[in-house]
Image: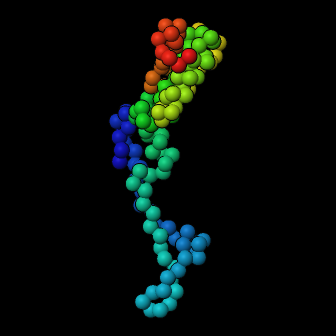
């Protein structure tokens, strides 16, 4: 039994006896009596189905995954469209360091981009503007 963020208990682990798969795959073994027998398969799943485990994980974290698990670790937000090219260079630098990054190139105000990244639960936002572009040699 695993507790989620709300204190509810979920049964994840299972042990099941399976008579169907051995028959479907025509599995057999030779017994001590020198006759062919159909085995019984035992399945164990310490965390249950992958779907149930992921559902409990998402609910427990409220979508705020740890950085290593987050599908998108960093989003780069340009103050305006004129910083999109520089933002792409920063993104490539991060990707070359095995950091999952993307660029928001939409023609939206920075406040809207920040809010959308928060809703998407991206752990880190890099805001790119004139000062940052001049301060680094990635131009």
Q: Is residue 92 visible?
A: yes
Q: Is residue 112 visible?
A: no
Quadrant assignment for the C terminus: top right
- Asked which quadrant contains residue 68, the reply is top left
- Considering every residue shown, the one lying at the far front of the view is 137
Residue at 51% in and 27% down: 93
Residue at 59% in and 20% down: 104
The answer to whether 1 is drawn above or below residue 134 in the figure is: below
Using the image as rendered, state which of residue 70 and residue 130 is in the foreground. Answer: 130
Residue 23 rendering spot, x and y as whole percentages: 57, 74
Residue 124 rendering spot, x and y as whole percentages: 45, 23
The answer to whether 32 is drawn above or below residue 21 in the figure is: below
Using the image as rendered, state which of residue 103 and residue 109 is in the foreground. Answer: 103
The answer to whether 58 is drawn above or below residue 14 in the figure is: above
Residue 74 rendering spot, x and y as whole percentages: 49, 25
Residue 61 rendering spot, x and y as whole percentages: 41, 32
Q: Along the horizontal axis of the image, is 80 left or right of 73? A: right
Residue at 41% in and 50% down: 47
How many badges with numbers are in the image? Answer: 0
Coloring basis for residues: rainbow
- Considering every residue shown, the one lying at the far bottom of the view is 34
Residue at 50% in and 67% down: 18
Using the image as rendered, state which of residue 59 and residue 68 is in the foreground. Answer: 68
């Amino acid at each position: 039994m695993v507790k989620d963020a709300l204190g509810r208990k979920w049964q994840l682990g299972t042990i099941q006896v399976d008579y169907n798969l051995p028959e479907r795959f025509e599995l057999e073994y030779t017994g001590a009596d020198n006759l062919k027998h159909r085995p019984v398969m035992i399945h164990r799943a310490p965390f249950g189905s992958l779907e149930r485990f992921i559902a409990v994980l998402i609910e427990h974290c409220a979508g705020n995954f740890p950085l290593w698990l987050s599908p998108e670790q960093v989003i780069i937000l340009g103050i305006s469209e004129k910083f999109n090219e520089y933002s792409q260079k920063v993104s490539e630098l991060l990707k070359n360091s095995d950091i999952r990054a993307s660029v928001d190139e939409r023609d939206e105000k920075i406040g809207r981009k920040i809010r959308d990244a928060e809703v998407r639960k991206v752990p880190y936002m890099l805001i790119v503007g004139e000062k940052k572009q001049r301060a680094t040699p990635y131009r």
